[in-house]
Image (cartoon, rainbow, N blue to C red):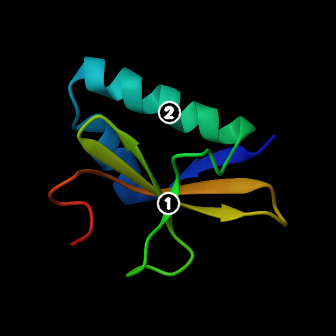
Amino acid sequence: MYSIEFEKQAEKDLRRLVPKRMRQIQERIDGLADNPRPHDSEKIKAMPRCLRIRSGEYRILYQVDDKEKLVIIARIRHRREAYR
């Protein structure tokens, strides 16, 4: 079981969403505690050590620290803004 931590910007990104979308994304993030590398996660070429998962039109960018059993959520952005 992994712990979930949010960077400050990711917390802001999550709070800006409408409640329905926020719940969907929170469910995806909670799933990372059990499996930090689900089958649909992908490495981001432009950002080493970063992974991403999709939740509708939003992307959850995160890092995994296996030593500390920690998942660090870096950003939660709309797909057109996620990689900028």
Residue at the image position 33 percent from the left and 40 percent from the top:
14
- 57 or 63: nearer the viewer: 57
| Secondary structure at numbered mark 1 | strand
Q: x%, y% of residue 81?
A: 17, 60
Point out the residue furthest to the front here: 39
Depth order, front residue of 41/7: 41
Q: Amino acid at mark 2?
A: Arg
Q: Nearer the viewer, mark 2 or mark 1?
A: 1
x and y, in percent, of residue 5 in the image: 59, 50
Tag 2, which secondary structure?
Answer: helix
Q: CA distance from mark 2 to mark 1?
A: 14 Å
Q: Is residue 49 above or below residue 63?
A: below
Q: Residues within 10 Å of mark 2 (few under 14, many from 20)?
A: some
Position of the C terminus by quadrant = bottom left
Which numbered tag is attached to residue 79?
none
Q: Earlier in the sequence, mark 2 or mark 1?
A: 2
The residue located at (29%, 36%) in the rendering is 15
Q: Quadrant of residue 19?
A: top left
Q: How many marks?
A: 2
Query: Is 13 left, or right, of 44 in this rendering?
Result: left
Report the amino acid beneath label 1: Glu
Image coords of residue 4 (percent x, y): 64, 45
Q: Position of residue 58 (x, y in %)?
A: 28, 43
Q: Is label 2 in contact with label 1 (beta carbons under 8 Å)?
A: no
Q: Which residue is mark 1?
A: 42
Residue designated by label 2: 28
Residue in the image at 66% along x and 62% along y? 64
Above or below, comparing residue 7 to residue 50 in the picture: above
Please tell me how crowded label 1 is: few (under 14), some (14-19), or many (20+) other residues with Cα within 10 Å. some
> Where 31 sits versus 23, above or below?
below
